[in-house]
Image (cartoon, rainbow, N blue to C red):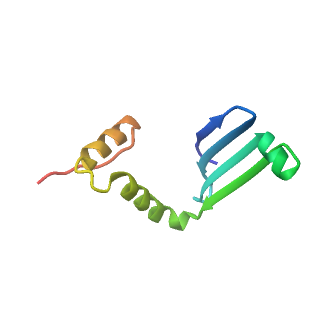
Amino acid sequence: MSDIINLVSQSGSTSIYIDARIEDNGDLRFSGQDIGEAPEQIFGKDDYEYWLTVPAAEKDRLLLALIEKIYKGNASVISEMKEFLDERNIPYGFQTY
């Protein structure tokens, strides 16, 4: 498996942990775990695990939907995207005319 990013790490009476990763087959998988009071009250045990998987073939559609949600109507999208890619050392091409 490749890199894992932590999205939520929240401690409390119910601790919540959510990660995302790209699986070896290219699927995008979100994995979550709730530990504590809430799962105990709902399920009778203090641990609840769950997954959401986007098939590899659908990741491009997800990427475009997320870009639209974040940047639609933002005239600075190109400069902001360049800055974002630079910060994360993600290669890209940029041309002007």
Q: Please provide percent x and percent y for residue 91.
A: 36, 45
Outermost residue toward the front?
Answer: 41
Name the residue at 37% across, 58% down: 68
Name the residue at 76% across, 50% down: 49
Name the residue at 67% across, 50% down: 31
Q: Please provide percent x and percent y for residue 25.
A: 61, 60
Q: Please provide percent x and percent y for residue 6.
A: 59, 39
> Residue 73 occupies which quadrant of the picture?
bottom left
Does residue 54 appear to the left or right of 89 in the view shown? right
Name the residue at 50% across, 61% down: 59
Q: Please provide percent x and percent y for residue 57.
A: 53, 67
Outermost residue toward the bottom?
Answer: 57
| Vertical side of 57 occupied by 27: above or below | above
| Vertical side of 61 occupied by 15: above or below | above
Outermost residue toward the right?
Answer: 44
Number of numbered discs overlaid on the protein picture: 0
Outermost residue toward the top?
Answer: 11
Does residue 12 appear to the left or right of 37 in the view shown? left
Q: Nearer the viewer, residue 4 or 80?
A: 80
Q: Nearer the viewer, residue 60 or 43?
A: 43
Does residue 50 appear to the left or right of 79 in the view shown? right
Quadrant of the snapshot with the C terminus: bottom left
> Residue 56 occupies which quadrant of the picture?
bottom right
Q: Nearer the viewer, residue 91 or 76?
A: 76
